Amino acid sequence: MDLQERINSCQSFATGKCPNQRLMEKAYLIPQLLDPKELRACENLCTCGCSCNPELEPGLAMQPRSAIEGRNDTVTANNPSVPRPVFRLYLIKPSHYDDDGYVIQWLRSDIPSNTMAVLNGIALECNAARVLGETVDIVITTLDEANHRVKPNRIIREIGVSGGKGLVALIGVQSNQFPRAVDIARPLRAADVPVCIGGFHVSGSLAMLPRIPPEIQQAMDLGISVFAGEAEGQFDQVLRDAYRGHLKPIYNVMPDLPRLEGAALPVPPQDALKGRMTRRACFDSGRGCPFDCSFCTIINVQGRKSRYRTADDIEKVLRDHNALGIKKFFITDDNFARNKNWEAIFDRIIRLRQEDGMTFSFIIQVDTMCHKIPNFVTKAGLAGVNRVFIGLESINPDNLRAARKGHNRITEYRAMLQAWKSIGVITCCGYIIGFPYDTHERVMRDIEIIKRELPVDLMEFFCLIPLPGSEDHKVLFENGSSMNPDMNSYDSEHVVTAHPLMSDEEVLRTYRQAWDAFYTLDHVETIMRRAAACGIKPGKVMKLALYFSAMRRIEGIHPLQGGLIRRKYRRDRRPGLPIESPMIFYPRYLWETITKSLQAHSGKGGEHPSKVHPRGRCLDSGDKGGSAHLRALQGNRGGWPSATAEAALKASVAHVAVAAKYGCEIPSTE
């Protein structure tokens, strides 16, 4: 049996699904890192470590797939015991700090990182192309800090043991994540480990500002390289420079926006689903947006011209994910409706569903005029879109004009939302608080109008933030206006610059009360009734409403940063804040975890210290009347059978235990 036949005969290894894949690759590449228990496990492995092919030689299986697939390196292929040079690449998506200085992490996080999948795909392509030489393997480690603790000392040790060649790439770093990214990099740079930071903060700042801002310059002074732009066709040079030990201070490829047709496709890391609440992946089918919103960074980083992947590319992405059992996706295009290839992509997905029997579901982001595009909404439904995010931003025309968002026509909102409801799609709308004409009274009035007049299922509220890379930030910067220098606060939940009509405290109070005003028990009942009438499972809408409302109130963070069971590490606290005594930290953390668990079982709610009391009865009120109010939904009220309502509520209770523990009272189904 020749080399290729041996590989093909072991499907588990060839597809990366061998139960001992990581252990064997580790045994081959860096046996010094194996502890005695792992060594014994390696000795006991039968051939490839699984039962699918007893003839495959153990030594062959210990090579990484990149070293044995599609290569003609006779020295290493015929002599698997000969060590190969290794370059260790760490792709890290950092989180950011909460108000107490602890990293926001979860046992299971919610939103997957598209940047991680994209960079992983690019890195795999670089390895396959042997960009560091025919005999050098790039060993890729992916760490999403939203669900994985980053340990710089371990990274330093692993790079040292494997020969000292490596790169730590902090990827997709947003403005609020930049301080955390630099804090991760500090000990690495002290140990002379090459570090590069890329993402929207660096790209937007270098694209829009006349000079390098202080926080980026301070990072560069530490020896951290920064990367501005998109990595397709550019990342190989960064890897080569890191391998030679000569990273440039700045890689600015902003003028060279790459074509996406035939570019490296997003590839989820093998263990990407382990830290997720749901088996959902994400990919971008296009980049760029034609509009000119003043608060947007997309248009200044990814451009105003639509660049898109082909239908063939998307089909390959879906088939590859389907082979891994992933059928739920978030298409991360800022505005999928303005992707010039949208129809070809939808048609291909529809064909896969109808002819190949594949079942997919999608979340997409669109604008408020997408329903005017012929066949767009209809084909979205046929392709499996079941949730859309729409940036309403405001229903105040003065605010929309001030934000240069004139394409949002308020008179079309209702028709647009009804078009999505007609095909059974859940609508989630964004609303920004802090536009120039906002006041507390106007915002609260507008929310009541939305509840009464617009068939919106879910609302996400944001404080208006002048993000680096936006026109708003550039204007404030050039005018010398006061802005909070702490990038950690640029998370759309804090106020970072003065408002013309409201104080900082009033903006925050309005932001918090907006959540409370929308997610009242009465209105959630209305949402569930509307969902049932449109063929949407009411329990599905209910669990999302509970999750959105409770995450903000109890954890004090936006639901997009949420997850299941908060993790905190005593020593992972922001520099400048004291490391708490174990006698204080652990009892409090334990008590916090226990009380939230008790809330989940009892259905009683609690309040985040920053909570402002809402108007009306809210989901975390914990009152018996509220529970009875939702229990009434088990009857025939709302036009669906009692059994259907009961099943939906039971499913909802099972799925939103995390929401319940944050204070949402779950109705009894007895």
Image: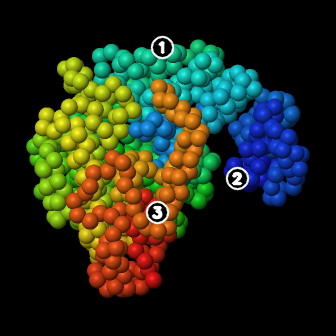
| Residue receiving disc 3 | 599
Structural distance between the alpha carbons of marks 3 and 2? 39 Å
Q: Residue at x 85, y 47 (%)?
A: 41
* Crowding near the residue tagged with mark 2, few <14, some 14–19, many ≥20 C-alpha atoms within 10 Å: some
Quadrant the C terminus occupies = bottom left
Question: Which secondary structure lies at badge 1?
Answer: helix
Q: Is residue 187 above or below residue 171?
A: above
Q: Disc 3 or disc 2, which is closer to the eye?
A: 3
Taking depth in this image into account, of 358 and 417 the one nearest to the observer is 417
| Residue 95 at x, y percent in the picture | 48, 38
| Residue receiving disc 2 | 17
| Residue 667 at x, y percent in the picture | 40, 74
Q: Amino acid at mark 3?
A: Gln
Residue 250 in sight in this render: no
The disc placed on residue 221 is 1
Residue 78 in sight in this render: yes
Q: Is residue 617 above or below residue 198?
A: below
Q: Disc 1 or disc 3, which is closer to the eye?
A: 3
* Crowding near the residue tagged with mark 1, few <14, some 14–19, many ≥20 C-alpha atoms within 10 Å: few
Q: Residue at x 41, y 50 (%)?
A: 555
Q: Disc 2 or disc 1, which is closer to the eye?
A: 1
Q: Quadrant of residue 51?
A: bottom right
Structural distance between the alpha carbons of marks 1 and 3? 48 Å
Question: Which secondary structure lies at badge 3?
Answer: helix
Q: Amino acid at mark 2?
A: Lys
Q: Amino acid at mark 1?
A: Asp
* Crowding near the residue tagged with mark 3, few <14, some 14–19, many ≥20 C-alpha atoms within 10 Å: many
On screen, residue 14 versus residue 467, left or right, reads right
